[in-house]
Image (tube, rainbow, N blue to C red):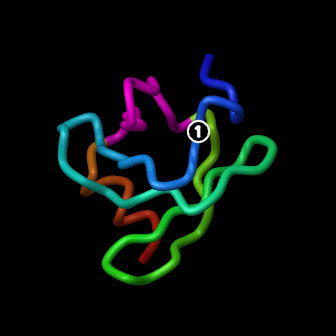
Amino acid sequence: MVKGSQIKEHMAVKGSDGKHVGTVIGAEGDRVKLVSGGMDHDDIDLAMIDAVENDTVRLLKTAEETVKAWH
């Protein structure tokens, strides 16, 4: 399981399909806040994260599925 301490500001966030979702602007507890296209979005839960690799957060859902949840 991914821990909040693994998530750092400016990390890229990608869907399970490898497509860019956003960039981390903060992490607190079990929530990660993202910015995408200059807009802040609702936090995502750590449970949505599959892995943290290098400077990338990889999600369990595709980029499209993740973005749909914001709209």
Q: Which residue is located at x 46 percent, y 70 percent?
A: 35
Q: Which residue is located at x 35 percent, y 64 percent?
A: 67
Residue 12 sits above or below residue 53 on the image: below
Q: Position of residue 26 (x, y in %)?
A: 64, 58
The residues colored magenta run 48-61
Which quadrant of the figure contains the N terminus? top right
What residue sits right under mark 1 in the picture?
7
Residue 56 lies within the magenta run: yes
Q: Nearer the viewer, residue 24 or 60?
A: 24
- Residue furthest bottom in the image: 38
- Give the total of numbered labels: 1
Residue 2 sits above or below residue 40 on the image: above
Question: Which quarter of the picture shows residue 46?
Answer: top right
Which quadrant of the figure contains the C terminus? bottom left
Please give left or right for residue 41 compared with residue 56 in the image. Answer: right
| Amino acid at circle 1 | Ile
Q: Which residue is located at x 70 percent, y 32 percent?
A: 5
Question: What kind of secondary structure does the magenta stretch mostly adopt?
Answer: strand
Q: Position of residue 54 (x, y in %)?
A: 38, 26
